[in-house]
Image: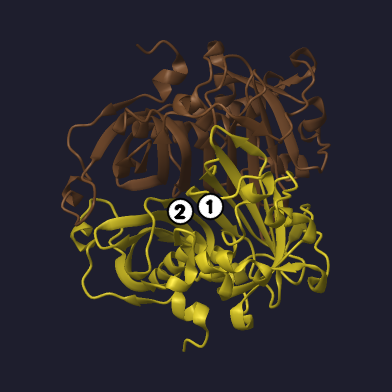
Chain colours: A brown, B yellow
């Protein structure tokens, strides 16, 4: 039963008819294909488009429904083809391989005859993984939440173009929001506390949204503006514990009009639960 | 004209007939599809399988032939489905979007009726990118080549199971090869100088091989053995200058029986030309 707005927004339902059906005869290919209907919610608009992390979770939700015995994304790679708009969408899925403990699935998000996202993913069961943890990465050093800067302090004109900001609580490291007052640090790092609206607890699917929600790390480099994603790959490494998440964006290679953005998501138990990297275009100066 | 063994090994030729042809009628999809024949060379065997980076470059070569006006991989994401064997293979490609300065293509490497790799990639023209460089990443600190440890010093039994090592020169940082004598550093870092055999100069396609050639970084953690790749995404950020490359592998999150391996490739001009990350399974203890 859907009890939270986030779950309603990423919901997918099996669709009658399968536009991919006429491919079922491909030689040597798994015939496991499905199509789902989704409704992209305008509440996830940010600037000119619909947030890519929200779209990724919707796509990821359809993949989960395609291989229900492999409920969790281990790795998903999304290539963004065109800008989505609020409203109806369909997600087509095709099982590439389903054997042993993992399944690899191709998925595409469509609106009308326009492909928005094409993706590949490998799903499995995170709860079935061994419990060894030898992480050497350092957890983001965030001040207590009451000393961080809530995104709700953003000016009205920003809130107007980013209704997405009403979908969650995001409390920025005070040293990482200088860009909000015209004083970017130039370090190329942004970190924040995060939780979904109404305290909806994190899970492996919602982490696909979390990895693409912070402002582009280029804000911290004095390059505000939209940074369109070419490609984003997320690795979900563990089921997140309940509670607030710590999210960190960083970049180390701004060059050739593009930059990589690495995201880490740490859960309330101090576990690195998600790592992602995207390749994006620099905002125009 | 093919003049070097590497170019011969990654060569692809248009194949008569197109097993993907019966998909040409998919509603709303680009009909641009092609099939290529390849011959996987046994010279790239390492341990039980054929090196994944060699396979990726062969696949990437077929994508380049599919969108010749977009010659360079900007991003490629490969999901490894089954272990390839030396011998004939086919690569099918399907253009997902070709517009403006980039094209996104899906590609699959097949042997008989077995899919080996399924991949997505966005190609463009690296020479057409703006020349801004604001990289904050640090170049690997490698001693002069004459003070590094050549892979040719590996024991005969290792050379026997890894004929791949005859395809290139790899000179390890002396502090990163303790694992070779039973004394891994435990830092999770391996770096080396690299160039292909016969001095074949690096290019954007060969970088797809370079990002997956060093021993698994788990060797440096005292976990030798095969670390099967689930997923590998490479971003090619610039055309490499001629000369030796510096390659660095590192991991920061060994957990749940898996680890991420980040690879950086720096060219002789001190430019970070490739970044990749793969998710792999830990070798069994």
Please indicate, yes or no, whether residue B112 appears anywhere in the rendered image: yes
- Name the disc covering residue B78, or none: 2
Within 10 angstroms of label 2, few (less than 14), some, or many (20 or more) residues?
A: many
Numbered disc 2: secondary structure: strand
Mark 1 falls on what kind of element? strand
Residue A50, can we see it?
Answer: no
Q: Position of residue A284 (x, y in %)?
A: 66, 52
The residue indicated by pointer 1 is B233
Residue in the picture at 78% in, 52% down: B136
When the figure is inspected, residue A47 is found, relative to residue A20, above or below; the finding is above
Q: Quadrant of the N terminus of chain A?
A: top left
Label at residue B223? none
> Quick check: B238 above or below A200?
below
Where is residue A233 shown, x and y percent of the image?
A: 52, 44
Query: Dot 1 surroundings within 10 Å: few (below 14), some, or many (20 or more)?
Result: many
Asked which quadrant contains residue B104, the reply is bottom left
Q: Residue at x 55, y 15 (%)?
A: A197
Protein chain holding label 1? B
Tag 1–tag 2 contact (CB < 8 Å): yes
Quarter of the view holding residue A274:
top right
Residue A280 image offset from top left, x and y in percent: 60, 49
């Amino acid at each position: 039963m859907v009890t939270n707005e986030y779950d309603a927004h990423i919901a997918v339902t099996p669709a009658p008819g399968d536009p991919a059906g006429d491919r079922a005869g491909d030689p040597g290919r798994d015939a496991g294909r499905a199509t789902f209907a989704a409704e992209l919610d305008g509440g996830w608009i940010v600037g000119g488009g619909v947030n890519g992390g929200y779209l990724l979770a919707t796509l990821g939700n359809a993949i989960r429904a395609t291989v229900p015995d492999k409920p969790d994304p281990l790795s998903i790679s999304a290539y963004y083809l065109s800008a989505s708009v609020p409203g109806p969408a369909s997600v087509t899925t095709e099982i590439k391989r389903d054997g042993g403990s993992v399944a690899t699935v191709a998925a595409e998000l469509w609106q009308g005859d326009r492909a928005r996202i094409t993706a590949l993913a490998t799903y499995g069961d995170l709860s079935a993984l061994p419990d060894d943890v030898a992480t050497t990465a350092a957890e983001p050093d965030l001040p207590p939440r009451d000393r961080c800067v809530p995104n709700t302090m953003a000016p009205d004109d920003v809130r107007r173009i980013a209704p997405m900001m009403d979908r969650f609580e995001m409390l920025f490291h005070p040293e990482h929001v200088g860009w909000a007052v015209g004083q970017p640090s130039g370090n190329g790092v942004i970190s924040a506390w995060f939780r979904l609206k109404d305290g909806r607890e994190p899970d492996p699917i919602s982490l696909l949204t979390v990895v693409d929600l912070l402002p582009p790390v280029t804000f911290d480099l004095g390059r505000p503006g939209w940074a369109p994603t070419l490609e984003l790959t997320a690795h979900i490494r563990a089921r997140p514990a309940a509670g607030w998440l710590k999210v960190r964006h960083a970049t180390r290679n701004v060059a050739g009009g593009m930059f990589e953005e690495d995201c880490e998501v740490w859960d309330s138990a101090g576990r690195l639960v998600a790592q992602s990297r995207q390749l994006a275009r620099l905002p125009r100066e």
